Image (cartoon, rainbow, N blue to C red):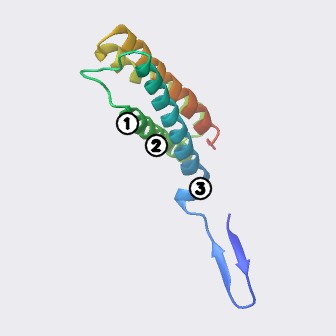
Amino acid sequence: MSNSTTSSEITVKQVPSRLTSPLPRTTASAGAIAAAVTTAGAAVLRAAGVPLAVHGEIPLASFAQLTFIGAVLSGVLLAVLNRRNSAPRQRFVRISAGLTALSCILPVAFAETTASKITLVALHLVAAAIIIPVLARRAI
């Protein structure tokens, strides 16, 4: 899809780039929203006295950074599946669910307290609940 603008002397044609196509924008939006929600959740829980620690306290910025990175990796996965798979939505949801389950193993194994384990797993699930359905809608 392209847009053309014509005047009496000049014609300008705007062609969407890869970075302005729907999947990268959706990935960035879902990542930003999920990062904000998980960071806000972590801040509220930390203020309530829940320790968020894995070999030391986790900085709040790490929640945002790692959530956004997870969203970007999910967007890359979906882009690859859209190009190489006959059923990308189904495959994306299955792979993402499996990767979410795997990501929950680390907090369970390494968090210092039971409250930390439960909270960190819950934050993983919240991020996945935001990112996966939004990106799955962009599967071709």
Between residue 102 and residue 56, name the one nearer to us.
56
**Which residue appears at 58% of the width and 39% of the height?**
135
Q: Residues within 10 Å of mark 3 (few under 14, many from 20)?
A: few
Give the mark, 2 or 3, whose residue is nearer the N terminus. 3
**Which residue appears at 55% of the width and 38% of the height?**
33
How far separated are the C-alphas under marks 3 and 1? 28 Å
Give the mark, 3 or 1, whose residue is nearer the N terminus. 3
- Position of 112 compared to 46: left or right? left
Q: Which quadrant holds the N terminus?
A: bottom right
Q: Secondary structure at mark 3?
A: loop
> Depth-wise, is mark 3 or mark 1 nearer the camera?
1
Q: Which mark is residue 25?
A: none
Q: Which residue is mark 2?
A: 72
Location of residue 99 in the rendering, given as x and y in whole percent from the top left corner? 44, 27
Which of the 4 image quarters holds residue 101? Answer: top left
Which of the 4 image quarters holds residue 132? Answer: top right
Q: Secondary structure at mark 1?
A: helix
Residue type of the residue flagged with mark 1: Ala
Q: Which residue is mark 3?
A: 21
Between residue 85 and residue 77, name the one nearer to us.
77
Q: Which residue is mark 1?
A: 61
How far separated are the C-alphas under marks 2 and 1? 17 Å
Q: Secondary structure at mark 2?
A: helix
Q: Is residue 94 visible?
A: no
Location of residue 125 in the rendering, given as x and y in whole percent from the top left corner? 50, 22
